[in-house]
Image (cartoon, rainbow, N blue to C red):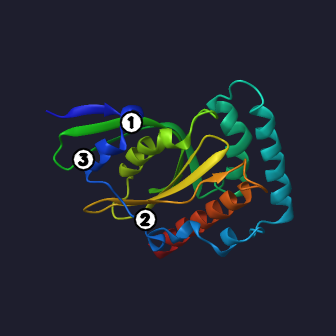
Amino acid sequence: MTDVVFAKDVTLYDLEKRFDLRLNGDRQFFPEWQTDSQETDSPETDSEDRKFLDLAKSAYMNLIRYPSMPENAVKLTVLSPLLHLANLLLPPFHIRTEASVSVTNPDESVTVEGRIDILVLEQNLWVLVIESKRAELSVKVGLAQILSYMLAAPVSGKPCFGLITNGGSHVFLKLVPGDPPTYGMSKVFDLLNPGNDLYHVLTILKNIRQLALKEQTDT
């Protein structure tokens, strides 16, 4: 009999035990977030993009002055500008929201089910999963949840990329399916850091977009 676990309740231990999911800490495993611009104070974003992202950071800093910032405010204030500037809302990409997913482990003993906050797709390629959390919660809260979604990527054998954010902190993930499935993580980009880490986040999103377009051309 197959047990059903909701993604919001799943733990990393569950994924490691039931799906043999493994973390790869080698920087070479996940080079997509490590562009040259990540090592400087001047990422390669144009001046208009920076102005827009500076406004987004200011709006976020204003919202956290108040007791609670719900998920919809996170999406409106931070995610929407990033998706627009990265051209992830234009063809051939499109968005599905509150998408239902499920994934069953190899011995069919457990199925993880849940709903993704925002899913950006390019044909059948699962390009980006964004799991937004309340601003007061650490991004660690959604780590196992987003990884369980990424395990359900519809195109076998293709890496998939994810972004988990609570509005102020952003972590990118890469999952490579296989036996065993393996994932890596970027560093945490945080709006409380000096400067504006949204510049870096946008650079990485654009990089992932280019990878997806190249994948489409090569197939």
The residue identified by callout 3 is 17
**Left or right placement of residue 109 versus residue 114 in this view:** left
Tell which circle, 2 or 3, labels the residue nearer the N-terminal end: 3
Query: Residue 8: where, in percent of width, then height?
Result: 42, 33
Neighbour tally class for label 1: few under 14, some 14-19, many 20 plus, Cα within 10 Å: many
Query: Residue 112: where, in percent of width, then height?
Result: 32, 38
Query: Residue 134: where, in percent of width, then height?
Result: 60, 32
Say which of marks 1 and 3 sits in front. Answer: 3
The residue identified by callout 1 is 7
Neighbour tally class for label 2: few under 14, some 14-19, many 20 plus, Cα within 10 Å: few
Nearer the observer, 24 or 109? 24
Check if mark 2's residue and mark 1's residue have beta carbons within 8 Å.
no
Tell which circle, 1 or 3, labels the residue nearer the N-terminal end: 1
The residue identified by callout 2 is 25
Nearer the observer, 141 or 173? 141
- For the point 74% across and 39% down, the residue is 77
